[in-house]
Image: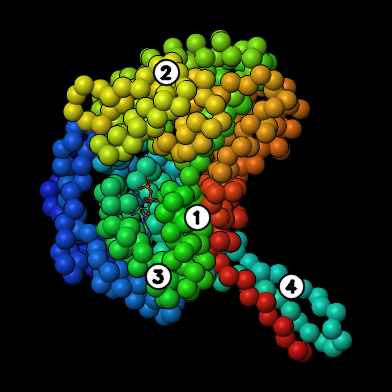
Amino acid sequence: MTPTSTALKQIQTFLATEKKMLLNGQWCAGQKGEILPAINPATEDIIGRFYAGGTGDVQVAIDAAHNSFHDKRWRNKTPAEKARILWRLADLIEEHGDRLALLETLDGGKPYQAARQGEIPMAAESFRYYAGWCTKISGRTSDISIPGDFHCYSRREPVGVVGLITPWNGPLVMAAWKLAPALAAGCSVILKPSEVTSLSTLYLAELIVEAGIPDGVVNIVPGPGATVGATLVNSPLVHKVSFTGSTQTGKSLVQAAMGNLKKLTLELGGKSPVIVYKDADLAKAIPGIAGGIFGNAGQVCVAGSRLFAAPEIYDDLLSGLIDYAQNITVGDGVNPETTMGPLISEAHRARVAGYVAKGLAQGATLATGGTALDRKGYFMTPTILTDVTPGNCVAAEEIFGPVLSVMKIDHMDHVIAAANATDFGLAGSVWTRDISTAHKTVADIRAGLMWINCHGIPDMAIPFGGYNQSGWGREGGPEGIEYYTELKSVVTAL
Ligand code: ADP
């Protein structure tokens, strides 16, 4: 699948001017007029430029969100009206799908087909899913036992002004996962995309205006985390921040929120185990496991990065995975034959390569990959490390790259303890034909999302979030909307 020539022309037009931020319904260059480049990681070319906000711009955005929340221009729309507008936004995302997918490829390096058939429908469906929830948010009545005549009920109210901070690895989908429930709940928002991949969010901003979301309800301020992000977290006018990013930055948000105790939802890092029993269907497991670690070049928080395989099938599984990895076509995501794109930046590739080197120094063996491509772009070959012991850095730390750490295990009785020996707890997968083994294993793994005989299947209907240091709270599902609400109880003496 290749981008159409029409989409290419349309995106050239979009990128011909510096993209502005959206403050109170206006396109603004920002108080300092600072401009950042957008770099294509496959070519190292600057493909566009955008204005980066500073603390003053964030303040304007916060005031706009605050005013729009307090005059209720969005939250007092009927649930059905809100639902119709969110649905319209979903339709617009689909209508502009070729262009949005192309931006994800050019700005973030994703293979175009993955962006067009994965990210775009997922973003649109996120708005449709939560459009459906607008009409279903409700409280309940409670009969109380205090003597007298009382009528008691609860109300689910929007939490207020929310800051949404997204990472670079899936900008459009992450924006949708946060915006859709926040808007369905009636919140006003300030969205800060990663300064590394801001373009698709700035394109989405245009669709948000076109869909008819009132001015000031969604404000979009790209820029650095240390200024734009930190101002959101520090502001007493922001009631909640929903953040997706690294565990390290998540911890700094917790520190920053100490003073004002604002609510935080944190979707952080992972080191997801992949557990393969001897009765697994290897013909399905091999592509599934490879997709779980090499998809988006491993730059996915749920990447299945630690493999535990039963000794009986270890050799067959490993040789199948090596073969699969060596047949992945690494290249520019606009080429239809590409199945794995580049890493996001030179610095990130150096970081991933550093992990591989350190892992080898700590006793791992290189089964395949581990090299950069000798061409422009931040490419790295799919990498498999074997003989990885629990103390090795490639077993313990999130690499966020196409690196699978294969952990030898002498008996599957030990697999639960080995898989749970991590600071993280985001996701994992189990591969077996035995339903009892499958369900017992998923129950024992400390992680927020487990897959059986598949890995990395997302859907907005599924609550998603982490145990341990993988985060706080959940996104997705009915629970996802609750994190954008406050619960108020009302006691009436009749
Ligand atoms: P990564 O860049 O590895 O995805 P980060 O956690 O550094 O992970 O970044 C995720 C998002 O958090 C980005 O939008 C980034 O700009 C933002 N960010 C970084 N540092 C801070 C901070 N101190 N406060 C708020 N947001 C931040």
Q: The residue tagged with tag 3: helix, strand or loop?
A: helix
Please identify, in this view, whether the residue under mark 2 or under mark 4 is nearer the observer. 2
Q: Tell me the amino acid under the disc marked 4.
A: Thr
In the picture of the structure, the residue carrying the numbered disc 3 is: 234
> Image check: 175 left or right of 7?
right
Relative to 258, does residue 292 appear above or below in the rendering? above
Q: Tell me the amino acid under the disc marked 1.
A: Leu
Q: Position of residue 360 (x, y in %)?
A: 42, 24
Q: Would the CB of label 4 be found within 8 Å of ligand 1?
A: no
Distance in Å between CA atoms under marks 3 and 4: 36 Å
Q: Position of residue 127 (x, y in %)?
A: 46, 52
Q: Tell me the amino acid under the disc marked 2.
A: Leu
Q: Residue at x 47, y 34 (%)?
A: 393
Distance in Å between CA atoms under marks 3 and 2: 45 Å
Placement of the N terminus among the 4 image quadrants: top left
Please identify, in this view, whether the residue under mark 3 or under mark 4 is nearer the observer. 3
In the picture of the structure, the residue carrying the numbered disc 1 is: 266
Q: Position of residue 402 (x, y in %)?
A: 40, 28
Tag 4 near tag 1, CB within 8 Å: no
Tag 3 near tag 4, CB within 8 Å: no
